Image (cartoon, rainbow, N blue to C red):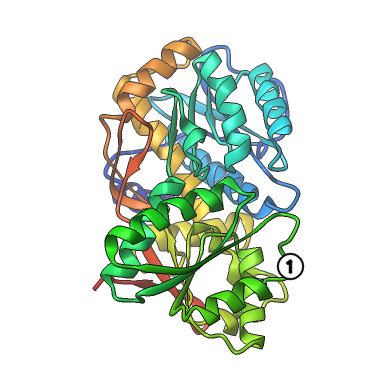
Amino acid sequence: MKMLKKAASIALASALVFSLAACGSKDGGDSGSSSSGGDVFMIGGIGPTTGDNAIYGNAVKNGVQLAVDEINADGGINGYQIEYQFEDDQSDSEKAVNAYNTLKDWGMQMLIGTVTSTPCTAVVEESHADNMFQLTPSATAVESIQYDNAFRMCFSDPNQGKASADYISENGLATKVAVIYNSSDTYSSGIYQRFVEEAKTTGLEVVSAEAFTADSKTDFSVQLQKAKDAGAELVFLPIYYQEASLILAQADKMGFAPEWFGCDGMDGLLALEGFDTALAEGLMFLTPFTADAEDEATQTFVADFNEQFGGTPNQFAADAYDCVYVIKAAIEKADITPDMSISDMSDALKSAMTEIQIDGLTGKQITWGEDGEPTKQPTVVVVEEGKYKVLQAQ
């Protein structure tokens, strides 16, 4: 995302109840030596900028950069500028820990990341040992923020599973539901488990629950046939968009046309190269953000992102952007200065996070508990004519 123009910056800032902010590096996050010396805030970021999940990591990297640039241009946080550096972890735990250590050597004082759950779970062990504040924009596994120094911007896996079951039931989308999930992925299996639990209390009948693994994620004919034979009216897909694209194509070939419902990992489907977006028509999924929303803050953000980085921002970019402003709000709440120790900063931020309330791109009146989990209302979008449209709950 690109630095907001002066007027646009003011408009977006006023759309946020509390000024949130943080992270920024003029060089776009390349490695380099720290120039802190106690006069700037040093914010690090970790996520996949190469490999299969690069779409998520690059979105987060750019979302943070946009917010950092805006804040620095507007005078910083309490008059202090931000330095920002982002390291690639390729969605790998060992590489993520190495990236964390690289950022520590650089002078990192707080961390936005990591982007995906398994690396985040590995890194939080390190940040907890250092008592360094950590805010992940998008790691959804419960274990990713299991310590008191760690918070998240997104919903956890269990919360996505519960919210999905509640929405399907409350809006009468189906009574007989099938699930296709990745049992080798903590994100997918975590959502699945909570969805099934909640389905029992909301009147949904799970007529088929079929798994696949990372080694068997190209042929879904067995899972789809079982869902069809069981009379599923809706298929719940707590998976990423790459596998979902194959499922939708294979279901179309076999003449199976249920309702489809997914979670935030579905974001990116319409931009997938070679995918026929007509196959996704009517697909619904939970997401904290859609670039098609008509509010001024979203449209300003989308325009500035496109100007600076090209393309349309996804929810990961929006989550990351909000993360920076959340950190800014917490720093201001706790009156933190860059010359404080990492541990003292972390202790102050832990307390401040439970006292702030944020209106951001990914939710209104967002608050956090001591467990690091956010409280906000979920948003559901549907694909209509190749675009996302926000659904209003009935």
Q: Is residue 158 above or below residue 80?
A: below
Q: Position of residue 184 (x, y in %)?
A: 64, 49
Between residue 355 and residue 237, name the one nearer to us: 237
**Number of numbered callouts drawn:** 1
Element at label 1? loop
Q: Is residue 188 left or right of residue 393?
A: right
The percent position of residue 86, horizontal first and vertical second, equals 65, 35
Q: Is residue 99 left or right of residue 318?
A: right
Q: Can residue 323 be seen at all in this image of the molecule? A: yes
Query: Which amino acid type is shown beneath numbered disc 1?
Result: Thr
Q: Residue at x 40, y 75 (%)?
A: 176
View extreme (bottom): residue: 255
Q: Is residue 76 above or below residue 317?
A: above
Quarter holding residue 252: bottom right
- The residue nearer to you, when weighing 240 against 257, is 257
Determine crowd level at label 1: few under 14, some 14-19, many 20+ residues with C-alpha closer than 10 A.
Answer: some
Q: Is residue 243 left or right of residue 155?
A: right
Residue at horizontal 57 percent and vertical 41 percent from the top = 117
Q: Is residue 25 visible?
A: no
Residue at mark 1: 218
Q: Measuring 34% from the left and 72% from the top, which residue is drawn there?
A: 391
Give x and y (percent) for residue 288.
41, 56
Does residue 86 sit above or below 270 in this rendering?
A: above
Q: Position of residue 49 (x, y in %)?
A: 70, 46
In the shown orientation, is residue 377 left or right of residue 48? left
Q: Quadrant of the C terminus?
A: bottom left
Q: Residue at x 66, y 36 (%)?
A: 29
